[in-house]
Amino acid sequence: MEEERRFEAEVADVETWWSSERFKLTRRPYTARDVVVYVAISSKVMLRTRWLRSCGERSRVTNNGTASRTFGALDPVQVTMMAKHLDTIYVSGWQCSSTHTSTNEPGPDLADYPYDTVPTRLNISSLSSTMTV
C-alpha cells in the first residue's frame, strides 16, 4: 500500500512538472505513469533538482544577455576542481567514449560506446560533487 501511494504521488508530481510553463508546448506519446515505472525515485529527485538549477541558469543568462561559463568534465577530480569556477559542467558522450578504448582517445563514431557509458559517468561525477566540501 505504501509503495502504491508513493508511486501515485510520483506520477502526480511528474504530471504537475509537465504542466509547468517550461513544457507548455511539449507533446509526448507517453504518460507520466510510463516514465515513473522506469525511473528510480532517488535518481529522479537528484536529476530534477539539477535540471531546475540549469533552467534557472539559462533563464538568468537569457534575461541578462550574458554568457554562462561552462566546460565538460569526465571524472570526479575534474568536477571538483571546476565546480567553484564555472556556472555549468556537462558530461559529453563523445568525451565519455574515450573511456572505452585502449588509448583513451575518442573515436570517429560518436555512438561507438555502450549505452550506459554517459549515465555511469554522470552518476560518478554527481556522487563526487555531493561529497565535496
Image: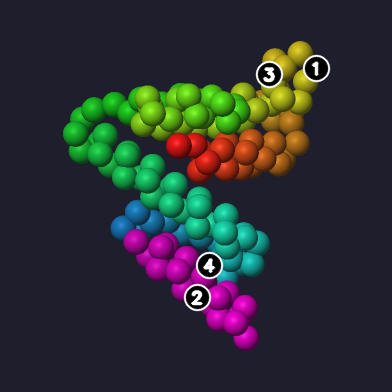
Pick whichever of labels 4 and 1 is earlier in the sequence. Answer: 4
- Residue 132 or 16: which is nearer the viewer? 132
Q: Which residue is mark 4?
A: 32
Verify whether residue 19 appears in magenta. Answer: yes
Residue designated by label 2 = 9
Quarter placement of the N terminus: bottom right
The x, y position of residue 26, in whole percent, is 42, 56
| Cα distance between the residues tagged 3 and 1 | 10 Å
Say above or below: 22 vs 97: below
Looking at the magenta stretch, what is its main secondary structure? helix
**The magenta stretch spans which residues?**
1-20
Quadrant occupied by the C terminus: top left
Type of amino acid at the residue the image marks with label 4: Ala
Residue corresponding to mark 1: 102
Q: Residue at x 45, y 69 (%)?
A: 13
Residue 18's image quarter? bottom left
Q: Amino acid at mark 3?
A: Pro
Q: Dot 3 lies on which element?
A: loop
Q: Mark 2 or mark 4, which has the lower sequence index?
A: 2
